[in-house]
Amino acid sequence: MVSELRSYLARITHWGQQSVNRRILIAAAVVGGFTLLAKLASLLKDLIVAHQFGTTPPLAAFSMAFTL
């Protein structure tokens, strides 16, 4: 499985080195992927906090403190 992953990454690396436009596409995909991961982590945090506090005043206090 590791060798298959290395082969796949080698193909992507080779494909991306052929053109400037492809490098830009890969960079945009990487940034977009990490942005998606950050949004999912934020959603998970919000779900955990909402489950813990419910819709109570401590939730409002936590939200304001986290925002600041």
Image: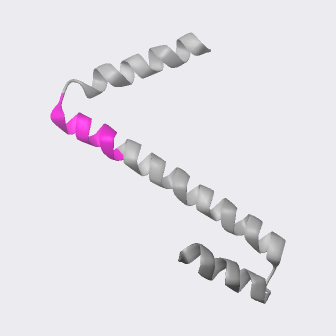
Front one among 64 and 45? 64
Q: Is residue 25 magenta?
A: yes
Left or right placement of residue 22 versus residue 33 in this view: left
> Is 8 drawn above or below residue 33 in the view shown?
above
| Quadrant in the picture for residue 18 | top left
Residue at (64%, 79%) from the top-left corner? 63
Front one among 51 and 5? 51
> Is 61 drawn above or below residue 26 in the view shown?
below
| Quadrant in the picture for residue 10 | top left
| Quadrant in the picture for residue 17 | top left
The residue at the far top in this view is 3
Residue at (43%, 21%) from the top-left corner? 9
The residue range painted magenta reads 19-28
Which quadrant: the N terminus?
top right
Left or right placement of residue 53 versus residue 61 in this view: right
Task: State the colouring used for the structure image.
Answer: one colour
The residue at the far left in this view is 20
Front one among 45 and 58? 58
Q: Main secondary structure of the magenta part?
A: helix
- Residue 38 in picture, x, y percent from top left: 53, 55
- Residue 5 in picture, x, y percent from top left: 53, 19
Residue at (60%, 73%) from the top-left corner? 66
What is the count of numbered marks? 0
The residue at the far bottom in this view is 57
Residue at (69%, 85%) from the top-left corner? 60
Left or right placement of residue 34 versus residue 46 in this view: left
> Is 26 drawn above or below residue 57 in the view shown?
above
- Residue 6 in picture, x, y percent from top left: 48, 15
- Residue 24 in picture, x, y percent from top left: 24, 41
Left or right placement of residue 39 versus residue 63 in this view: left
